[in-house]
Image (cartoon, helix red, strand yellow):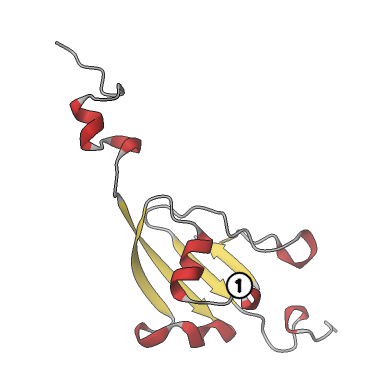
């Protein structure tokens, strides 16, 4: 007898297989640069974390206690996921996935984000 694993009440769904899995964790790496390094704590500017599936960039920021208004740029796997100063604020709703490297950067002195004009 072939049981449809996607049906509620099926043994496979109750076990949490696939995208229906409950309490699945991902391993990510978080890096804090520039003025945000002071929030890194004893593990240093680069730390490995185990997070629940569905966690967002905003959840990580909250967990690490980094003030959102001090974040100038967010990069996930080397790609800028912040909207930037012209387009709008950082995308705190972006979800992280297993193996991601998420980097948070504060403004650099004498940069536009630090309040100094760019020459």
x 30%, y 49%: residue: 24
Q: Between 50 and 100, which is closer to the camera in this rendering?
A: 50
Residue 55 occupies quadrant: bottom left
Q: Position of residue 78 (x, y in %)?
A: 54, 62
Instruction: Read off the residue under disc 1.
Output: 68
Residue at the outermost left position: 1
Judged from the image, the secondary structure of the residue bearing numbered disc 1 is helix
Residue at (53% x, 77% y) in the render? 66
What is the number of callouts on the image? 1
Q: Quadrant of the N terminus?
A: top left
Specify whether residue 78 is in view: no
Q: Is residue 67 left or right of residue 20?
A: right
Q: Is residue 5 above or below residue 91?
A: above
* Name of the residue lying farthest toward the front: 9
Q: With 83 as the anchor, is 116 left or right in this view?
A: right
95 horizontally vs 92: left or right: left
| Viewport quadrant of the C terminus | bottom right
**Neighbour tally class for label 1: few under 14, some 14-19, many 20 plus, Cα within 10 Å:** some
Image quarter for residue 6? top left
x 24%, y 25%: residue: 9
Work out whether residue 66 or residue 74 is closer to the camera in this orientation and state it: 66
Q: Residue 97 at what x, y percent from top left?
A: 42, 52
């Amino acid at each position: 007898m072939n049981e449809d694993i996607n049906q509620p009440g099926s043994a496979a769904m109750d076990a949490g297989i696939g995208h229906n899995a409950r309490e699945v964790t991902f391993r990510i790496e978080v890096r804090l640069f520039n003025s945000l390094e002071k929030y890194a704590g004893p593990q240093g500017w680069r730390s490995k974390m185990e997070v629940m599936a569905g966690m967002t960039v905003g959840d990580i920021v909250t967990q690490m206690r980094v003030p959102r208004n001090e974040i100038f740029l967010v990069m996930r796997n080397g790609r800028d996921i912040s909207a930037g100063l012209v387009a709008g604020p950082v995308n705190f709703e972006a979800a992280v996935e297993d193996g991601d490297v998420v980097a948070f950067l504060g403004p650099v002195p004498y940069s536009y984000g630090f309040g100094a004009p760019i020459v």
